[in-house]
Image (tube, helix red, strand yellow):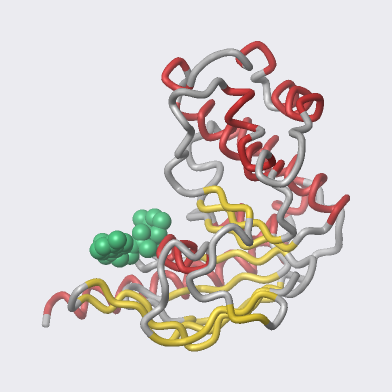
Amino acid sequence: MKLSLQMISKSFDENLVLNNVSFHVNNGEFVTLLGPSGSGKSTLFHLIGGMMSPDEGTIYLNGENVNGKRGLISYMPQQHSLLPWRTVLQNVVFGQEFSKKPDLEKAREWLNKVGLGSYEKSYPYQLSGGMKQRVAFIRALMSPQPFMCFDEPFSALDEFTRADMQQWLLSIWEQDRRSILFVTHSIDEAIFMSDRIYILSARPATVLKEIQIAFPRPRGKELMLSNEFLTYKRDIYESLQRTKGELVLNENH
Ligand SMILES: Nc1ncnc2c1ncn2[C@@H]1O[C@H](COP(=O)(O)OP(=O)(O)OP(=O)(O)O)[C@@H](O)[C@H]1O
Ligand SMILES: [Mg+2]
């Protein structure tokens, strides 16, 4: 499934948040957005998910205008948004219930896989922040839509759990190749996971740069110690630092 955003602008009151943003995710592609905090990444996800509509521009899924249409993508929001009255297992299968009988066996298998096998009957309030994040992550993975959006899915996890989750997401994605749009603040994570990266400016967000990550797949962690990896990292770091500089400059005026 191909996603394409064309010349999207969005303001909240007088505050311009997205300024003429265009980008796309090809069928089966893994694309990451990197940008400063408050630049408008989650707002982009809300628009793609149809929770709100853009002021200008069009969002296309496989060529169809989907401005303001909900339910077409699987979406893991930045805040976990688990339903407090449902158990872990009931939360995980929530996204499937609209279309078919939920696959409880797979839900249990995947909860086991992320170390939450013994928590299936627990409620969200009984879980740590990182555990809730993993439950929300599995819920998004299990939702049937062919296009998936993940908004900083691993931000609450320790370094080792995070590395495991990255590898696991890649291995699942390599099996079924659903299209993925991903947001992270980790430059390493972005390079390791993605086919392409878009760098967004500080608010109002525009696309500053597009970077193709040429590493073959499957990818192993040793990649992160290679010279090519460091070259990408330096390039991205400098772009992000420049846009941070613009933000400071704007605020002085
Ligand atoms: N519903 C809303 N009403 C008013 N302002 C909003 C709303 N949603 C977002 N904003 C504003 O839009 C800007 C971008 O917010 P957004 O959450 O998209 O940033 P972000 O890039 O996801 O940041 P972070 O990396 O910190 O998650 C912020 O200034 C925020 O205050
Ligand atoms: Mg955000």
Q: Image height check: is 15 above or below 216? A: below
Q: In screen coordinates, is 149 left or right of 146?
A: left
Residue at the spot x=64%, y=23% of the render?
89
Q: Position of residue 150 (x, y in %)?
A: 58, 53
**Which quarter of the figure has residue 29?**
bottom right
The answer to whether residue 38 is seen in the rendering is no
Q: Position of residue 19 (x, y in %)?
A: 37, 84
Q: In screen coordinates, is 156 left or right of 205?
A: right
**Which quarter of the figure has residue 167?**
top right
Q: Where, quadrant-wise, is the N terminus in this rendering?
A: bottom right
Residue at the spot x=78%, y=32% of the render?
103
Q: Nearer the viewer, residue 62 or 101?
A: 101
Q: Position of residue 135 (x, y in %)?
A: 59, 31
Residue at the spot x=46%, y=74% of the render?
200
Q: Image height check: is 188 above or below 93? A: below
Q: Position of residue 203 (x, y in %)?
A: 32, 74
Q: Nearer the viewer, residue 89 or 225?
A: 89
Q: In screen coordinates, is 133 left or right of 106?
A: left
Please state the quadrant of the image where ligand 2 appears: bottom left
Q: How many marks?
A: 0
Q: In screen coordinates, is 103 left or right of 8?
A: right
Q: Where, quadrant-wise, is the C terminus in this rendering?
A: bottom left
**Which quarter of the figure has residue 181?**
bottom right
The answer to whether residue 63 is seen in the rendering is yes
Q: Image height check: is 99 above or below 125? A: below
Residue at the left extreme of this rendering: 253
